[in-house]
Protein backbone atom coordinates (compact mmCIF):
# COMPACT_ATOMS: atom_id res chain seq x y z
CA UNK A 1 0.00 0.00 0.00
CA UNK A 2 1.26 3.46 -0.91
CA UNK A 3 1.49 5.76 2.08
CA UNK A 4 1.14 8.87 -0.09
CA UNK A 5 -1.77 7.94 -2.41
CA UNK A 6 -5.25 8.61 -1.04
CA UNK A 7 -8.60 8.00 -2.66
CA UNK A 8 -11.37 10.29 -1.46
CA UNK A 9 -14.83 8.74 -1.79
CA UNK A 10 -17.24 11.47 -2.87
CA UNK A 11 -20.97 11.52 -3.48
CA UNK A 12 -21.09 11.56 -7.29
CA UNK A 13 -21.47 8.67 -9.70
CA UNK A 14 -18.91 5.87 -9.65
CA UNK A 15 -18.64 2.83 -11.93
CA UNK A 16 -16.26 0.00 -11.09
CA UNK A 17 -14.18 -0.14 -14.29
CA UNK A 18 -10.79 -1.69 -14.89
CA UNK A 19 -9.15 1.73 -15.10
CA UNK A 20 -10.65 2.66 -11.73
CA UNK A 21 -9.46 -0.60 -10.17
CA UNK A 22 -5.94 0.06 -11.45
CA UNK A 23 -5.92 3.67 -10.25
CA UNK A 24 -6.92 2.87 -6.65
CA UNK A 25 -5.08 -0.44 -6.36
CA UNK A 26 -2.31 0.89 -4.09
CA UNK A 27 -4.31 3.53 -2.25
CA UNK A 28 -5.46 4.49 1.22
CA UNK A 29 -9.09 5.66 1.53
CA UNK A 30 -11.06 8.41 3.23
CA UNK A 31 -14.84 8.72 2.78
CA UNK A 32 -16.71 12.01 2.65
CA UNK A 33 -20.26 11.68 4.00
CA UNK A 34 -22.48 9.75 1.54
CA UNK A 35 -19.45 8.85 -0.57
CA UNK A 36 -19.08 5.93 1.83
CA UNK A 37 -21.70 4.09 -0.23
CA UNK A 38 -18.97 3.36 -2.81
CA UNK A 39 -16.83 1.47 -0.27
CA UNK A 40 -18.79 -1.78 -0.49
CA UNK A 41 -18.73 -1.81 -4.30
CA UNK A 42 -14.97 -1.19 -4.26
CA UNK A 43 -14.42 -3.82 -1.57
CA UNK A 44 -12.43 -1.47 0.64
CA UNK A 45 -12.54 -0.17 4.22
CA UNK A 46 -11.71 3.54 4.59
CA UNK A 47 -9.48 4.58 7.47
CA UNK A 48 -11.63 7.67 8.16
CA UNK A 49 -15.17 8.90 7.49
CA UNK A 50 -15.76 12.66 7.66
CA UNK A 51 -18.67 15.01 7.13
CA UNK A 52 -21.88 16.38 8.57
CA UNK A 53 -23.56 13.08 7.57
CA UNK A 54 -26.62 14.82 6.16
CA UNK A 55 -26.53 12.52 3.11
CA UNK A 56 -25.72 9.32 4.99
CA UNK A 57 -28.65 6.92 5.53
CA UNK A 58 -28.80 4.94 8.75
CA UNK A 59 -28.27 1.61 7.01
CA UNK A 60 -24.97 2.89 5.59
CA UNK A 61 -23.78 3.83 9.07
CA UNK A 62 -24.81 0.40 10.32
CA UNK A 63 -22.81 -1.29 7.53
CA UNK A 64 -19.53 0.36 8.57
CA UNK A 65 -19.58 0.54 12.38
CA UNK A 66 -15.81 0.14 12.73
CA UNK A 67 -14.71 3.04 10.51
CA UNK A 68 -13.62 6.03 12.65
CA UNK A 69 -16.02 8.94 12.15
CA UNK A 70 -15.11 12.60 12.32
CA UNK A 71 -18.36 14.59 12.41
CA UNK A 72 -18.75 18.26 11.51
CA UNK A 73 -21.72 20.61 11.90
CA UNK A 74 -23.88 21.27 8.85
CA UNK A 75 -23.09 25.00 9.15
CA UNK A 76 -19.41 24.73 8.25
CA UNK A 77 -17.09 26.71 5.98
CA UNK A 78 -15.98 23.83 3.73
CA UNK A 79 -17.56 20.94 1.87
CA UNK A 80 -17.22 17.39 3.19
CA UNK A 81 -14.99 16.65 0.20
CA UNK A 82 -12.63 19.50 0.98
CA UNK A 83 -12.43 18.34 4.60
CA UNK A 84 -11.60 14.80 3.46
CA UNK A 85 -8.86 16.10 1.15
CA UNK A 86 -7.40 18.16 4.01
CA UNK A 87 -7.36 15.07 6.22
CA UNK A 88 -5.57 13.10 3.50
CA UNK A 89 -2.94 15.80 3.11
CA UNK A 90 -2.44 15.89 6.88
CA UNK A 91 -1.76 12.14 6.70
CA UNK A 92 0.91 12.56 4.03
CA UNK A 93 -0.99 12.49 0.73
CA UNK A 94 0.91 13.55 -2.39
CA UNK A 95 -1.38 11.85 -4.92
CA UNK A 96 -5.14 12.37 -4.61
CA UNK A 97 -7.79 10.37 -6.44
CA UNK A 98 -11.21 12.00 -6.15
CA UNK A 99 -13.57 9.09 -6.83
CA UNK A 100 -17.18 10.12 -7.41
CA UNK A 101 -16.11 13.69 -8.15
CA UNK A 102 -17.86 13.89 -11.53
CA UNK A 103 -21.54 13.71 -12.37
CA UNK A 104 -24.24 13.06 -9.80
CA UNK A 105 -27.10 15.27 -8.69
CA UNK A 106 -24.99 18.23 -7.52
CA UNK A 107 -23.35 20.00 -10.44
CA UNK A 108 -22.13 22.69 -8.04
CA UNK A 109 -20.10 20.06 -6.17
CA UNK A 110 -18.74 18.58 -9.40
CA UNK A 111 -17.62 22.03 -10.56
CA UNK A 112 -16.01 22.74 -7.19
CA UNK A 113 -14.10 19.45 -7.38
CA UNK A 114 -12.66 20.50 -10.74
CA UNK A 115 -11.64 23.93 -9.47
CA UNK A 116 -10.14 22.45 -6.31
CA UNK A 117 -8.16 19.96 -8.38
CA UNK A 118 -6.50 22.77 -10.33
CA UNK A 119 -5.65 24.57 -7.09
CA UNK A 120 -4.19 21.37 -5.62
CA UNK A 121 -2.12 20.80 -8.77
CA UNK A 122 -0.67 24.30 -8.40
CA UNK A 123 0.36 23.33 -4.87
CA UNK A 124 2.27 20.37 -6.27
CA UNK A 125 -0.21 17.53 -5.74
CA UNK A 126 -0.88 14.84 -8.34
CA UNK A 127 -4.67 14.77 -8.81
CA UNK A 128 -7.07 12.49 -10.68
CA UNK A 129 -10.84 12.93 -10.68
CA UNK A 130 -12.87 9.92 -11.79
CA UNK A 131 -16.33 8.47 -12.14
CA UNK A 132 -14.83 5.23 -13.43
CA UNK A 133 -16.11 5.94 -16.93
CA UNK A 134 -14.89 9.52 -17.12
CA UNK A 135 -11.60 10.99 -15.87
CA UNK A 136 -10.25 14.50 -15.33
CA UNK A 137 -6.71 15.73 -14.75
CA UNK A 138 -5.64 19.34 -14.07
CA UNK A 139 -3.51 21.02 -16.72
CA UNK A 140 -1.35 23.90 -15.53
CA UNK A 141 2.00 25.23 -16.77
CA UNK A 142 4.10 22.21 -17.70
CA UNK A 143 3.54 18.90 -19.47
CA UNK A 144 1.36 15.85 -18.74
CA UNK A 145 0.64 12.63 -20.59
CA UNK A 146 -2.58 10.59 -20.50
CA UNK A 147 -2.61 6.98 -21.64
CA UNK A 148 -5.94 6.84 -23.48
CA UNK A 149 -7.33 4.17 -25.81
CA UNK A 150 -7.14 5.03 -29.49
CA UNK A 151 -10.44 6.53 -30.58
CA UNK A 152 -11.52 7.71 -27.11
CA UNK A 153 -12.85 11.21 -26.61
CA UNK A 154 -11.34 14.03 -24.57
CA UNK A 155 -11.75 17.78 -24.13
CA UNK A 156 -9.64 20.56 -22.63
CA UNK A 157 -11.90 23.28 -21.18
CA UNK A 158 -9.90 26.26 -20.00
CA UNK A 159 -10.53 27.94 -16.67
CA UNK A 160 -8.52 30.93 -17.91
CA UNK A 161 -6.84 32.15 -21.06
CA UNK A 162 -4.41 29.41 -22.17
CA UNK A 163 -1.07 30.43 -23.66
CA UNK A 164 1.25 28.01 -25.41
CA UNK A 165 -1.12 25.04 -25.45
CA UNK A 166 0.14 22.00 -27.36
CA UNK A 167 -1.72 18.71 -27.85
CA UNK A 168 0.17 15.82 -29.44
CA UNK A 169 -0.99 12.42 -30.69
CA UNK A 170 -4.61 13.48 -31.17
CA UNK A 171 -6.85 13.74 -34.22
CA UNK A 172 -6.83 17.53 -33.87
CA UNK A 173 -3.34 18.46 -32.63
CA UNK A 174 -2.34 21.93 -31.52
CA UNK A 175 1.10 23.53 -31.29
CA UNK A 176 1.85 26.56 -29.12
CA UNK A 177 -1.79 27.61 -29.38
CA UNK A 178 -3.42 30.64 -27.74
CA UNK A 179 -6.89 29.68 -26.45
CA UNK A 180 -9.04 32.64 -25.38
CA UNK A 181 -10.99 32.18 -22.17
CA UNK A 182 -14.42 30.69 -22.94
CA UNK A 183 -13.46 29.31 -26.36
CA UNK A 184 -14.88 25.90 -27.36
CA UNK A 185 -11.97 25.14 -29.73
CA UNK A 186 -10.60 22.39 -27.46
CA UNK A 187 -13.88 20.56 -26.86
CA UNK A 188 -14.32 17.06 -28.39
CA UNK A 189 -10.98 15.75 -29.57
CA UNK A 190 -9.98 12.13 -30.24
CA UNK A 191 -6.98 10.31 -28.79
CA UNK A 192 -4.62 8.40 -31.05
CA UNK A 193 -3.18 6.62 -27.98
CA UNK A 194 -1.10 8.28 -25.27
CA UNK A 195 -1.77 12.03 -25.55
CA UNK A 196 0.78 14.65 -24.52
CA UNK A 197 -0.39 18.07 -23.29
CA UNK A 198 1.89 21.08 -22.77
CA UNK A 199 0.96 24.51 -21.49
CA UNK A 200 3.07 27.62 -21.01
CA UNK A 201 0.59 29.47 -18.78
CA UNK A 202 -3.01 29.18 -17.71
CA UNK A 203 -5.35 26.75 -15.97
CA UNK A 204 -7.38 23.99 -17.57
CA UNK A 205 -8.79 20.52 -17.08
CA UNK A 206 -8.38 17.54 -19.39
CA UNK A 207 -11.69 15.65 -19.37
CA UNK A 208 -11.39 12.19 -20.92
CA UNK A 209 -13.88 9.43 -21.72
CA UNK A 210 -11.62 6.37 -22.08
CA UNK A 211 -14.54 3.97 -22.57
CA UNK A 212 -16.24 6.13 -25.19
CA UNK A 213 -14.70 4.98 -28.48
CA UNK A 214 -17.15 6.81 -30.70
CA UNK A 215 -14.19 8.60 -32.28
CA UNK A 216 -12.91 5.40 -33.88
Image (cartoon, rainbow, N blue to C red):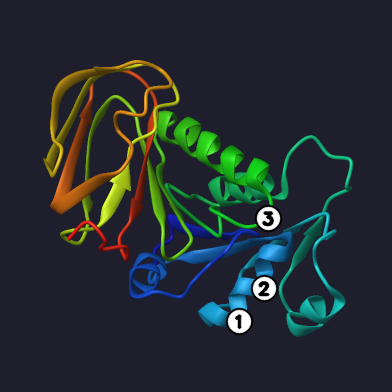
Horizontally, is 109 left or right of 205 in the view?
right
Q: Report helix, strand or loop for mark 2.
A: helix
Q: Looking at this view, is 19 or 161 the one in front?
A: 161
Q: Quadrant for the C terminus, please.
A: bottom left
Q: How far is mark 3 from mark 2, CA to CA? A: 15 Å
Tell me which residue sits at (15%, 59%) in the image: 150
Using the rendered view, name the quadrant where residue 170 is placed.
top left
- The spot of residue 40 in percent (x, y) is 60, 81
Above or below, 42 against 152 in this view is: below
Q: How far is mark 1 from mark 2, CA to CA? A: 7 Å
Tell me which residue sits at (49%, 58%) in the image: 6
Quickly name the residue at label 1: 40
Quickly name the residue at label 2: 37
Q: Report helix, strand or loop for mark 3.
A: loop
Quickly name the residue at label 3: 105
Which is more N-terminal, label 2 or label 3?
Answer: 2
Using the rendered view, name the quadrant where residue 173 is placed.
top left
Amino acid sequence: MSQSTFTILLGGELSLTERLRHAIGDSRFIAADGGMRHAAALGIMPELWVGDFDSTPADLEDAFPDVPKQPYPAAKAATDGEIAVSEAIARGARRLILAGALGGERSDHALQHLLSAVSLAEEGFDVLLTSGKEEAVPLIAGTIELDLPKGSLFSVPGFSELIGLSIENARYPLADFHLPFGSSRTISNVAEGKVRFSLRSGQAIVLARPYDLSGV
